Image (cartoon, grey):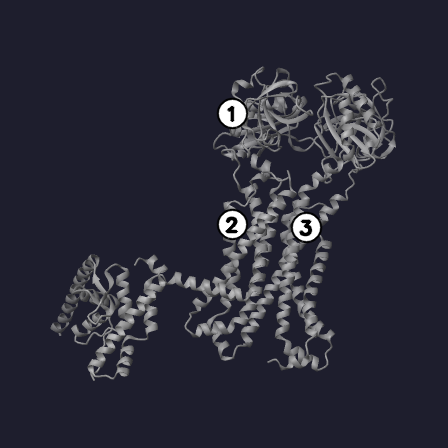
Amino acid sequence: MRWWQRLFRRNQCEEELEKELSFHLDQHTNDLIADGYSPDEARRQARLALGGPEQVKEMCRDVRGVRLLEDLFQDLRYGVRTLRKNSRFTAVAVIVLALGIGANTAIFSVVNGVLLRPLPYPDSEQVVSVFQHDTKVGIERAPVSFANFIDYRARAQSFAGMAALRPFSFDSTGEGEPETSHSWLVTEDFFDVMGIGALHGRVPSRDEFQPGRESVVVLAHGLWQRRFGGDVGVVGRKLTLDGKPYTVVGVMPPEFHLMDKRGMIAPYVLSESDARRRGANFLTVVGRLKAGVPLAQAQTEMRDVAARLAQEYPQTNREMSATLVGISEQMLGGVRPALLVLLGAVALVLLIACANVASLMLARGSERCRELAIRAALGAGCFRVMRQLLTESFIIALLGGVFGVLLAWWGLDVILALSPGSLPRSEHVSISLPVLGFATALSLMTALVFGLVPSLHFSKSDLQDTLKEGGRTASAGVSRHRLRRGLVVTEIALALVLLVGAGLLVRSFARLISVDPGFTTENTLALQVHVYEQYPKAELQAAFFEETLFRLASLPGVQAAGGTTAPPFEDGIEVDSDFAIHGQPAPAPGQEPTAQHTIVTSDFFRAMGIRLSRGRFFEKSDHARAPPVVIINETFARRYFPGEDPVGKRILVKRLTRPVEREIVGVVGDVRHTGLDSPTKPELYMHMLQVPFGSMTFVVRTDSDPVMLLPAVKREVWTVNRNLPFYSVATMEQLVANTLKERRLSLALLGTFALLALAVAAVGLYGLISFSISQRTHEIGVRMALGAQGRDIVKLILGEGLLLTVVGVALGAAGAFPLTRFMRGLLFGVTSTDPATYAAVATLLTGVALLACYLPARRATKVDPLIALRIE
Amino acid sequence: MLPLSEKKCDLPQGTLDLLILKVVALGPVHGYAIAQRLDHATRGVVQVPQGSLYPALHRLENRNLLAADWQQTETGREAKFYRLTRKGRSQLETDAASWQRLSQAVALVLKLSEGGA
């Protein structure tokens, strides 16, 4: 028979072996009888000659060559039977492991999908983003201006190609409500630079980047699914964008998206006048480095190019350098720190789970001492016994792995539901093959980790002692107990580390949301519109806004309505520029003071709830023919008019308006613009009637729920202009919450893991103390017989538990100090060694641990001393 | 009662295989017969501990040097009969030749010592 036949036809092999050997014995016996022996003596001699049949059979079995596998099957069968009998232990161990493996699998699939999967662009390390580095204001990644882009492209030798993207919003009209289609306009090298083509149809060809031919558009996959239901027939159809017909020529594949998920891509043809604009910065630039050119080299070259441009065009480019950022860093750099912290956290959770299961196995092992001793006596080698225990560990680990994967599957759904948009490449996050491989590897590794501990412990010498002393050994039990205590202390220490991490995030979050944004966030709507196209002249723009705001303010339920060019927490048009203060000495060139310039309407401050600290708000009397006025914020006042009243002073404002001196009529409170964690900047506000602007965000303060008033608000706007789409619509609360989404998710996850760790560690402690009590029943009986009260017993037990807890907390704190350093990037307003957090967490952990000890301790007091004394 | 031989030689494993192959080469035979043959042919000097006979037989069978099937003996019982395969035959020739060479070399060395004394 071939070896695999021998494996599967074991019974047949055994039968044949039996037959062969008994034939031999019978023949020999007959021969000996023929020689004169008595039948019994003959039989005996024959057996002696052959040797013990079992031994012979064992040798034959070894020769069979499939011993290892057969033994494995035997171990597996026995292991399953044993685990079924001890179903409570098995269930607890499997659950604990499932939690550990599940958490790790879930986080790993996020890390795998977001960070590890290669980007869909070929040779993506050669694709870089190019930014202007405004050294004066300190912005490293600023958008690039038209003329600078053209010069970068022409002069940089390290690049195989460079393309610019301009954010643009088409007004989609024609069908239903007017809609805004956020798009990128791209220059002709874009698709070559990225190296990716269309999924359906094609990308725009080179000659479609000529003036007059550029009315084609490519759809992003998400938009294609959402608005056109994934219909392939959309290729070739015409859409009305900005009143003109555009032909859809293709659809991009789903994994293609840049930093910002826009719906369409259209060719951008730089006009002559565009090409000359060096000061207007709003292009995003990407480039592909030539093969073999390292990023550092290209960065140096770009800096030189920018330096030369700074000399040639000092008006606009002075203090302007260039920064290159690899595309993967650009896309993923924001989430990488948080994800890595979470990965570290779940690794700790898994360690705790392993320690817990190892402790459980040790506990069970002390009950199995006799069984294992008998096995050893029957001839099982030390290795064989270890193999049996390891097999059981593997069974538990595999079960834990299976349930863990199921848990991770469910958990991923929850994670993805909580993080729409804030997680880049989230469509790749799933339980894929590499993730399953990871889960399997993890199961096997944990089986080794928590299986080896008890296996190594039950060495042969132990077992012989066990048999001698009738089942209860002092020495082995003590060392086992010591090992278990060590494991529990480890669990407590690791749990403390996790709790400290979660606690720090909690404090950061609390600090963050207690920051005063400078305006009231409740009951406010923000709707952004762009009216350049429809009202090209300044007076028309002003008139439109006037009328619309008047109508909005008259709506029942609306307290105030205002407009602004730069609403907080939103992609507004922020203009940072310099100004000059009348009466102060002219600063050195390059040192001009800068401030954010915002244009607002009269009721804006009231609508936003920004308070006035000096002077007055704008009024209708500050119209185009009145003296030019300006309002500044408190940071501005403090920095440039320290110790004096700014109201009545004049400053020269050059941007957004013809350079003219404006009188300061009021000072308002500071407003945080990009996020609650952003610092306040000096700001100046100008009145829309004096400085009309073509895009505004309407800010509407309502009496009650703003969402209910939204249809009425939209209706009023459309009454004034039926074809005006909204660029974005949100409530102020939503905008603020958006900036907190990532922190909230990190906090939720880390908090969950920390609480999980706490629960597992507490359960471990509970189990240990219960066991310890059961071992000390005799001693407790003696004490109670001698007059100890229940209270004293409880104190005794709690004492043991408290010692373990204190050691664990101390170790954990020592470990947390260096480890939380990795979290620094995620914290706000707290240091990684914040003592208050450590103290609070230590108290919580100690409290929970004491409770875990108290419950079994209370049970111990109910012991009847007589029964306890009788236990041997 | 016949005394069971006391002068038992310990055979190295390779030699046992060689002896078995030779015995089987003489014709299909079952395990007990091989033991008897060996005992008989070596005049009782080589008494194979019968316990090692069967593992050796099975090992040779696994290596395809012997083929086995169940047949009826004269007494009507079924026994497992082993016969030599072609591979076994060539293995036997090779091993026998090596053994000859080895024993000749040893004999030479032994003669040398006596002669020199």
In space, the residues marked 1 and 2 are separated at their CA atoms by 38 Å
For residue A202, the mark is: 1
Q: Amino acid at mark 1?
A: Arg
In x, y percent, where is residue A746? 65, 46
Chain of the residue on which disc 3 is drawn: A
Q: Of discs 1 and 2, which sits in the foreground? A: 1
Q: Which residue is mark 2?
A: A438
- Tell which circle, 3 or 1, labels the residue nearer the N-terminal end: 1
- Secondary structure under tag 1 reads loop
Same chain letter for marks 1 and 2: yes
Pointer 3 or 2: first along the chain: 2
Q: Amino acid at mark 2?
A: Phe
Q: Is residue A673 left or right of residue A765?
A: right
In the image, is residue A692 above or below residue A756? above
User: Residue A580: image x %, image y %?
Assistant: 78, 25
Q: Can you give x and y, in whole percent of width and height, for residue A34 in the image?
A: 20, 80
